[in-house]
Amino acid sequence: MAATAVTASVVASPRRLVWQRRRAAVARNWALYRQNRQGMVGLGVMVFFVLLALSSPLLVSPAEIEPATAQGLPNQRPYMGYPLGTDNFGRSVLDLVIVGARISLLVGVTATFVAVALGATIGLISGYYGGTKIDVVLNAVTNWFLVIPWLILAIVLSAILGASVWIIILVIGVTSWAQPARLIRAQALSVRARPYVERARVLGCGDRTILTRHILPNVAPVIFANAILTVAVAILTETTLSILGLGDATAISWGVIIEQAFSAGAMTNGYWWWMMPPGIAIVCVTLAFTMCGYALDEVLNPKLRGR
C-alpha cells in the first residue's frame, strides 16, 4: 500500500508541476496585459458588447422588433422613448442594434473558431512535416486560398449554398483559415527544430505525441492571439456579405440592419439615425478585438514586449 501511494504521488507530481507552471504563466501574462492601456480599453469595449449580446433577450422582447407589432412611428428621428429613432416599420433602432449584437458576435466568434481550427490543424501538420510531400501539398492549398480574392470566393459560396447564419459562418471560416495556417506553420517549423523536440523523437515519441504535447503548447499563444484578430475580420466579412444582399434576412445582425437601411433609401432620404448606430457598433467591436489582439501579441511575443 505504501509503495502504491509513493508511486501515485511520483506520477501525479509532474502533472501538478506542469499545471502550476501554466497557472503561473497565465498570471504573469495577465499582469503584463493589464499594463497595456490599449489592451485594457479594447477588453472593456469587448466585454461591454458581449454582455449586451448575452442580455439582449432580457432587454428587447420579440414583439418590439417584429414589423407587424412595432409601436413607433416610421422613419422618425430620435425622440422620447426612441433614443436612436425608428426604421421604416416603426421599430426602435436601439432595439435592433441590441438584438443585432447577438448575431454579429455569434457569427464572428463561431466563424473564427472554424477558421482557426482549420488553419491550426493544417499549419501544424504542414510545419511538422516541413519539406515533405505533405508539406508541399498543404502549402500549395494554403497559397491558393491566400491569392484568390476572398470576397469573390465568399460571394460564390454564399450564392451556391444559400443565405443562412450557419452557411455564412461556414463561408467565412472556409475563406479565412489560410492566413492563420501560414503563421502557425512558420511557428511550428521553428519549434520543430528545438532540442527538446529532437530529444522526444530520439526517446521514441510518436508524431501525435510530439505534435500535441510539445509543438502545440508552444504554438498555442500564437493561435490565441491570431484568433482574437480573426474575430474582427469575421465580423467585417459578415457585414460585407449582408450589405451585398447575401446575408440571412431573417436574422437581425448589424450588417442586415445596414442593408435594410440602404434598400429603404435611408441614405438618399437622410435617415442617418438608421445607418450610423450599427456602423458605429461594428467599428467599435472591430477596434476592440484588434486592440486586444495586438496587446496579446505584445504580451506573448518577447521581442515586441521589449519594445
Image (cartoon, helix red, strand yellow):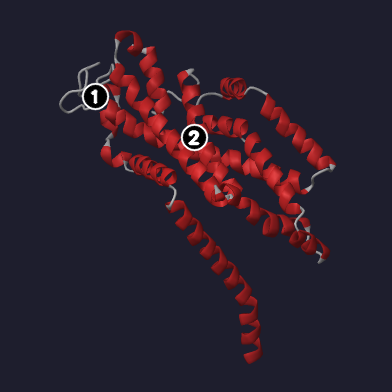
- Going by the picture, which residue comes out furthest to the bottom? 2
Q: Residue at x 22, y 17 (%)?
A: 76
Image coordinates of residue 116 in percent, x first then y, are 60, 41
**Residue 242 drawn above or below residue 184:** above
Q: Amino acid at mark 1?
A: Ala
Q: Residue at x 45, y 38 (%)?
A: 106
Q: CA distance from mark 2 to mark 1?
A: 32 Å
| Element type at mark 2 | helix
Image coordinates of residue 243 in percent, x first then y, are 46, 19
Q: Is residue 273 left or right of residue 73?
A: right
- Quadrant, the N terminus: bottom right
Image coordinates of residue 234 in percent, x first then y, are 52, 33
Give the labeled residue for mark 1.
70
Q: Residues within 10 Å of mark 2 (few under 14, many from 20)?
A: many
Residue 247 shows up from this direction: no
**Residue 113 drawn above or below residue 286:** below
**Residue 175 drawn above or below residue 33:** above
- Going by the picture, which residue comes out furthest to the left? 80
Whichever of callouts 2 and 1 sits on the residue coming sooner in the sequence is: 1
Give the labeled residue for mark 2.
232
Q: Quadrant of residue 157?
A: top right
Q: Is residue 293 left or right of residue 42?
A: right
Q: Residue at x 24, y 22 (%)?
A: 85
| Element type at mark 1 | loop
Residue 39 shows up from this direction: yes
Q: Residue at x 76, y 49 (%)?
A: 128
Q: Residues within 10 Å of mark 1 (few under 14, many from 20)?
A: some
